[in-house]
């Protein structure tokens, strides 16, 4: 979670990691016959989201943020943003910190203009001009090449926020 240099503190799984035997996990009978291994267990995901929330809070607190404006990239990012926001609220409460955490949403779509040139368009569910002089955290669940994310960061920066960071 930082400006444009992404993924400072991440968990890395090697390409040759076969995962953990599915026999070590409680799986629905419906899926047991299809699953041989679990690569990332739910507990690891939950713990990582908790740790990310602490790191995010510490970062924004150390930079005197008056609020944290989460900008969730829909649709895929909703569950991650929801879980992250919940952990941020829980950790802020545990630490006796009262920093408002505000969530908004944006959708990234491929658009075709009159010249038939593909372009990325962003649609938000509220007026993003309200982000001016605010601290923004873009929350995305999956990044493949980073091109759309970089365009989104530039788009958000056009609203002149105080800072823009990314969690994914």
Image (cartoon, rainbow, N blue to C red):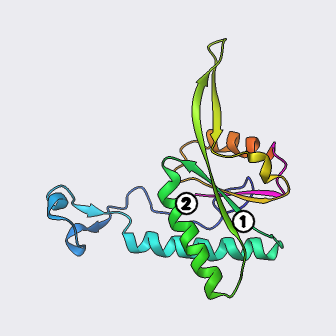
Q: Position of residue 126 (x, y in %)?
A: 68, 46
* Quarter of the image where one finds residue 35: bottom left
**In which image quadrant can residue 2 be found?**
bottom right
Dot 2: what SS? helix
Q: Is residue 159 magenta?
A: yes
- Residue 61 pos. (x, y %): 77, 76
Measuring from the top left, give residue 3's x and y in whole percent.
75, 56
Task: State which quadrant residue 45 falls in.
Answer: bottom left
Q: Is residue 137 above or below residue 60?
A: above
Q: Residue at x 72, y 46 (%)?
A: 153
The segment highlighted magenta reads: 158-168
Residue beneath disc 2: 81
Badge 2 crowding class, 10 Å Cα cut-off, few under 14, some 14 to 19, many 20 or more, is many
Front residue of 115 and 142: 115
**Residue 114 x %, y %:** 66, 12
Q: Residue at x 69, y 39 (%)?
A: 151
- Distance (Cα) linking label 1 and label 2: 13 Å
Residue 68 - label: 1
Res 11 seen here: no
């Amino acid at each position: 979670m930082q400006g444009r240099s992404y993924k400072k503190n991440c968990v890395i799984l090697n390409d040759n990691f076969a995962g953990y035997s599915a026999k070590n996990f409680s799986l629905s009978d419906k899926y047991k016959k299809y699953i041989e291994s679990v690569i990332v267990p739910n507990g690891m995901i939950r713990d990582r989201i908790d740790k990310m929330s602490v790191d995010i809070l510490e970062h924004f607190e150390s930079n005197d943020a008056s609020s944290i404006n989460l900008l969730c990239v829909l649709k895929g990012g909703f569950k991650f943003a929801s879980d992250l926001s919940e952990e941020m609220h829980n950790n802020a409460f545990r630490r006796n910190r009262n920093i408002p955490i505000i969530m908004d949403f944006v959708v990234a779509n491929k658009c075709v203009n009159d010249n038939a040139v593909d372009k990325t368009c962003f649609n938000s569910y509220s007026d993003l001009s309200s982000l001016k002089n605010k601290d923004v955290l873009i929350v995305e669940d999956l990044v493949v090449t980073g091109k759309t994310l970089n365009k989104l960061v530039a788009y958000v920066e056009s609203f002149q926020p105080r800072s823009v960071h990314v969690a994914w």
